[in-house]
Image: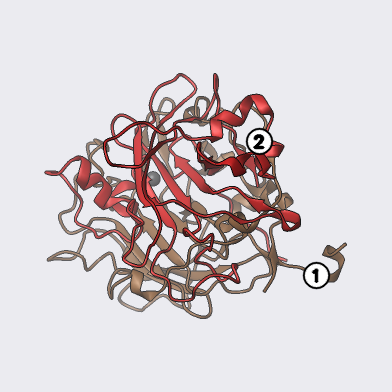
Amino acid sequence: MSELTPSQTVGPYYAYGLTPEGRKRWKPDDHYRWKETVGDDLVTPDAVGTRIQIEGVIYDGDGKPIDDAMLEIWQADAQGRYASPADSGARPNAAFKGHGRSATDASGGFAFHTIKPGPVPGPDGKMQAPHVVFAIFSRGMLRQVYTRMYFPDEAANAGDPILALVPADRRATLIATRPERGGQTVYRFDIRVQGDGETVFFDV
Amino acid sequence: MSLFYPRESLDAFPKHLSPGYKSTVKRSPSKPLIIVPHTLSELSGPVYGHDAIEDGDNDLTRQHGGEPLGERIIVHGCVLDEDRRPVAGALVEIWQANACGRYVHVVDQHPAPLDPNFTGAGRTVTDKSGYYKFVTIKPGAYPWGNHHNAWRPNHIHFSVFGHSFLSRLVTQMYFPGDPLFPFDPIFNSVTDEKARNRMIASFDLENTVPDWALCYRFDIVVRGREKTPEDVH
Ligand SMILES: [Fe+2]
């Protein structure tokens, strides 16, 4: 058995390597000349299901927006299949990867365009409610933190085996809100890294 | 292949709160993390193939009209899991300062020159043996505001994907013998010396190319072990 290479912070200067296009969108005249491999728009031509936008702001322990965080999401497709060899139900040649990456802007905001995931298998044959896994990286974070975003309009949340492990008074930190936005399906998921209303993070 | 991901392996990682590195004080969770079983959502992970990259993406010295200034180096190694099995087809991304210790990122205002022939970003995908290779220049040390006279040791930032989303790793590769090691709170946030040393590349004379470039070897071990009979209770 071999021992892990330790994690280190992503630092403040990752954007030109990891999220060059996202930065271009926010500062159109001032972008890095490097194409993007992992972006914040996950929608592919083969992606069926409800198109959604996930957006939010990430805050530090002083309630200040974190303007140099990097968020990655990992999700199933609308049928609840992960585009991964670990999922025996996955289609081998799906273009929809279910993986995205967003930098935060000067206001600590992030956004993803994707499709709403379906329910996926959980422990002991139970199904998990639809959710999106988040891994968050930032200057000041020596290792990523993991959390999950659930959807507010899902009866299945009540039976979700992971939500059930979260103290009831903190569960709301994992459930997005659904602001009205003409014609678009938007889910808002603010993340508080520390302090009042601290988002639940998982030890995985 | 059925892998599992023991949490004990993470003892090698820094703690979220490591006060010597001041930015961790307000950016670390204060409430206990909730222990959850590993479900398909954790045990699966994105796959990036060779279509994610283009020829030359792994050569940071050939992205512009001329060659960058600085010491040309080769950095190579394997991405492995905890059984030292190769992780094939893993996306490896790097970014770094130029030879003067300056990043092209707009926030970096360290008064050292930018190099018009160096951006400092590269990517590649590991082959069947988990092998990757970059050609770049040795990054310079740079000052930062953590404490009086704070300087980061020379380093290259790495972002790596493994077998699952739990294997996802962002780290930094250091160079052997750096005199700044004892003074760097990010490097020393890894409190175990052996674990710290796993972030230091080794000088690789065998693969150093005569009259052209020094070589450094950096193997990266990410989470994931095969279940053995004694693990199945
Ligand atoms: Fe750095």
* Residue type at the position of mark 2: Leu
User: Residue B14, can we see it?
Assistant: no
Q: Quadrant of residue B220?
A: bottom right
The percent position of residue B162, horizontal first and vertical second, equals 54, 63
Drawn colour of chain B? brown
User: Reading the chain from its start, which is encountered first: label 1 or label 2?
Assistant: 2
Question: What SS does tag 1 mark?
Answer: loop
Question: What SS does tag 2 mark?
Answer: loop
Query: Quadrant location of ligand 1?
Result: top left
Same chain for marks 1 and 2?
yes
In this view, A90 is above or below B165: below
The percent position of residue B52, horizontal first and vertical second, equals 35, 69
The percent position of residue A190, horizontal first and vertical second, equals 44, 31
Circle 1 residues within 10 Å: few <14, some 14–19, many ≥20: few
Name the residue that disc number 2 marks. B33
* Residue type at the position of mark 1: Thr
Chain letter for red?
A
Q: Residue at x 38, y 26 (%)?
A: A65
In which quadrant is the N terminus of chain B drawn? bottom right
Residue B228, label in figure? 1
